[in-house]
Amino acid sequence: MGRRKYELPKQKNTFGLNITSMTDMFTILLVFLLQTYSTSDVELIPENGLRLPQSTTSTNPVESIKLTVSKELVKLDKTKIADMKDSNFEAKDIDPNDTNFILPIFNELDKIAKDEKLKNDPAVKEGRILLQADASLPYSTLRKVMYTASMAGFPQLKLVTVVGN
Amino acid sequence: MRRGKKVRINHEYEFELDLAPLLAVMVKLVPVLLVSSAFVQMMTIETQLPQVVQQAIEKNEKDEKATHISIEVKEKEGVKIVVKKNDGKESSEIVPKKADGTYDYARLHERLVAVKQQNPEVFKVDLSPDGNVSYNDIVRVMDEARRSRDNNIRFPIMDKLTNKETQTDYMFPEVTFANTMEG
């Protein structure tokens, strides 16, 4: 008796993928992302380890010179300009004749203020600074930054905070 | 003459909606939104710093016209509110720290509301924190001074355009760090 050969049922080479559940997932994701969509025209990227203070203010940031003061370093825009030690400036960065005057900050801001290309920039013209400072820093450190910025022709200070109660 | 064939409509016919183009749009949208999403919302507090040369002149001019209010954030005692009237009369009060060593923000807010009710025309305060006061505490004090938290408490303000009195919940939104230039 010959063995009967088993034949697989003939199948189509293509099949229809059910994407309904995937569309559901994408819709939820889209709604969530639309909620968190940033309408601000200023891009602020917090420094690693920087803890900004919480505030109830609702003023959106405007285009300004970005200065970051964390517990470890001072950054102007994305460039590191000085190191910090114990939440204070290093002795070499402080003017020996004026203990509130931070030389690297003044030099960099002065360069911007005197730059011919940036002469018509509203942020430079009006002397605006967006200060991202760590919440734990003492006022004595911040005062030096404010004093130096004011001396360099940047008297309008905008303190960056995170939204909170 | 032959009669035409009757067209039969199958009302139970089911079809599958093609979701592929919708999914294609979403797949493109999601990365765009992911890049431009702000998961940490950041705002700013505007402050005016005293100008080196012009500030003293401007300040003197302003002092003659309006009541001068200053907030001194002391490291040990608490927060001191000083009100200097244009006739030279000066009054001050201290909102002491709580037993656990933190600032009494609720009490400070209450006192600032009382000061604002007595001086509704003033919107500017001078802030003078001690050197060891943390930035976080300074921002909290500014928050307490900015606007009234109680929806029933409003302050009168004169609209110069319409010459009518309106109400605002803003107390002292303009903050100047007064001791920046001190050594």
Image (spheres, grey):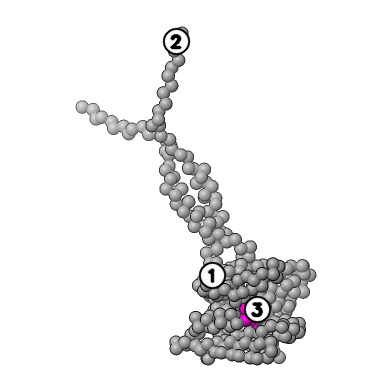
Q: Earlier in the sequence, mark 3 or mark 2?
A: 2
Mark 1 or 3: in front is 3
Residue with the mark numbered 3: B121
Could you tell me how far apart the alpha carbons at marks 3 and 2 are, in whole angstroms?
A: 97 Å
- Image vertical order of residue A149 relative to residue A7, above or below: below
Q: Residue furthest right?
A: A116
The magenta segment: B119-126
In front of the other: label 3 or label 2? 3
User: Residue at the spot x=53%, y=70% of the render?
Assistant: A163
Of the residues shown, which amino acid type is indicated by label 3?
Answer: Glu
Report crowding for label 1: few under 14, some 14 to 19, many 20 or more residues within 10 A (C-alpha): some
Q: Give the residue displayed 68% in from the left and 80% down from the top.
A: B49
Q: Which residue is mark 1?
A: A163
Can you see residue B102?
A: yes
Marks 1 and 3 on same chain: no
Q: Nearer the viewer, residue A95 or A157?
A: A157
Residue B121 magenta-highlighted: yes
Q: Specify few, some or many for label 3: CA neighbours under 10 Å numbering under 14, 14-19, or 20 or more.
A: some
User: Element under label 2?
Assistant: loop
The dot on residue B2 is: 2
Question: In the displayed image of the protein, which residue is found farthest to the left?
Answer: A1
Mark 2 touching mark 1, by CB under 8 A?
Answer: no
Disc 2 with disc 1 on a shared chain = no
Amino acid found under the numbered disc labelled 2:
Arg
Q: Chain of mark 3?
A: B
State the separation of the CA atoms marked 1 and 3.
Answer: 29 Å
Q: Main secondary structure of the magenta part?
A: loop
Q: Residue A73 appears at what percent x and percent y?
A: 59, 78
Q: Chain of mark 1?
A: A
State whether discs 3 and 2 lie on one chain.
Answer: yes
Q: Secondary structure at mark 1?
A: strand
